[in-house]
Amino acid sequence: RKPAPPPAPEIVHWMKGMSVGKQRRNIATGLRVKVRFVTKSNKRGKDGKPLRRLKWYGGVVTDVATSGKRIKIKYDDGTSEVADFPDKDIVVDDEDNRRHRLGVPADAFIPPPPQSPSPSPERRPPAPP
């Protein structure tokens, strides 16, 4: 399996803030996902235990249960799994992860653009008396 780049922090934060119901209502076949897996490293920590590494893998949602509680994911390496949804380790994201299928709405999973601060009025020196 070839890992995918991790999702942007703002996407992870946005999905964490979404209600379970909203995520389940908006998940659809054809959406690209990144799924996080924990792997053990050959290196050991100070406590002697193997270090854990987090890796993200890309896939596409190929089936959604009627309630949206379970989804089937086909990974880019051809393997598949059925997973509970939502799950903290599954993020809807097509950034550097191929693209969502054309016509499948992903808007609910895309955070709004950051608000730019309102411009402050120019400060002028006081007028001479």
Image (cartoon, rainbow, N blue to C red):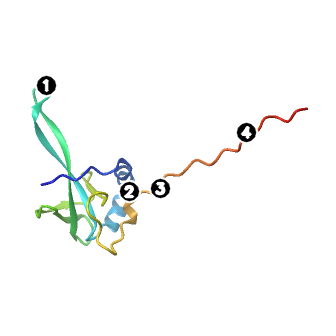
Name the residue tied to disc 3: 113
Look at the numbered disc 2 and give the secondary structure of its residue: loop
Question: Residue 29 at x, y = what percent?
Answer: 25, 71
Please report whichever mark, 3 or 2, sits nearer to the chain's N-terminal start.
Answer: 2
The label shown at residue 47 is 1
Please report whichever mark, 2 or 1, sits nearer to the chain's N-terminal start.
Answer: 2
| C-alpha span from label 4 to label 3 | 29 Å
Please report whichever mark, 2 or 4, sits nearer to the chain's N-terminal start.
Answer: 2
* Location of residue 92 with respect to 8 vertically, above or below: below
Q: Amino acid at mark 4?
A: Arg
Which quadrant of the view contains residue 92? Answer: bottom left
| C-alpha span from label 3 to label 1 | 43 Å
Disc number lying in front (2 or 4): 4
Name the residue tied to disc 4: 123
Q: Amino acid at mark 1?
A: Asp
Please report whichever mark, 1 or 4, sits nearer to the chain's N-terminal start.
Answer: 1
* Location of residue 75 with respect to 50 vertically, above or below: below
